[in-house]
Image: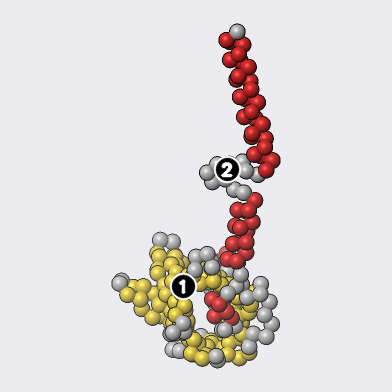
Amino acid sequence: MMNEAREKLILVTLLLFCTTLSVLAQDGTMPKGKGAVTEKNKNDKFTEMLEYSRPNSHHAILGSIAGTWAFQDKNRAFVKGTIVRKSLYDGRFYQVEIIGGKLPLPVADGKMKEDNYKSLQIEGYDNGKAEFVSTSINNHIGSDIEVQTGTYDSVAKTFTYYWESELIAGEKTRNKRLLKVIDNGHYVEEFYEERGSEFIKVRELVYTKLIENTNPQ
């Protein structure tokens, strides 16, 4: 009799436990394990990602130098050309196309070809990492995709970018670029290479605006 009573008690206990679980599941009060992702959490994360994706005041700084510009090397008269900086995806990024003078370019099969220097850059501001980013490719020196990261000083109106290049295998160089906004129609770029314990200026370009950015995308 005692064994029979014990079995009945166990069955009743299990029945009550299963009934409780069923009620909790139906009313949404089922306790969640550590790290569980609810539908609300998913929606909150997606909303947060949308906010981090929006262009903001940092992107607007890049927009202030959009347009068509003529550039000239301060010390080398033959280094000159034009650049076009235009908005992409409603100001989230900026595309920069550079065309310079003609020069010998290395192409396949060990040959050289004379053509205009060309470069394509994409600029933006990474909201997640809180830094400006610029990628660059060109048809002259380097088979790499150059990635520069930097900051902006609103008082000095200056972007400061850093990156590391390895144009020859095993020979790495740390570089710095300053983009200084003079006024609405002028800015300068200074390029530096790290030699020893200091950065040495290797080039300075002067930019003059020709056309405003009249076709933002």
Q: Residues within 10 Å of mark 2 (few under 14, many from 20)?
A: few
| Mark 1: amino acid | Gly
Please state if 152 lies on the left or on the right of 185 as rendered: left
Amino acid on which disc 2 is placed = Lys
SS under mark 1:
strand
Which of the image's four quarters has the C terminus?
Answer: bottom right
Residue with the mark numbered 2: 32
Q: Are marks 1 and 2 in contact (CB under 8 Å)?
A: no
User: Crowding near pointer 1: few (<14 within 10 Å), some, many (20+)?
Assistant: some
Which color scheme does this rendered protein use?
secondary structure
Which of these two is toward me, 206 or 133?
133
The location of residue 161, given as percent across then percent down, is 45, 74
Based on the displayed image, in which of its 4 quarters is residue 192 positioned?
A: bottom left
Give percent across and percent down for residue 48: 59, 62
Whole-percent x, y for residue 6 in the image: 58, 15
Give the quarter of the figure containing the N terminus.
top right
Residue name at image x 61 percent, y 91 percent: 210
Residue 173 lies in quadrant: bottom left
Horizontal side, residue 165 vs residue 217: left or right: left
Q: Secondary structure at mark 2?
A: loop
Q: Is residue 35 visible?
A: yes
Indicate which disc, 1 or 2, sits on the residue closer to the N terminus: 2
Work out whether residue 104 or residue 46 is closer to the camera in this orientation and state it: 46
Residue 121's mark?
none
- Residue 136 in view of the camera: no
Q: Which label number is shown at residue 150?
A: 1
Residue at the spot 60% in from the left edge and 53% down from the top edge: 41
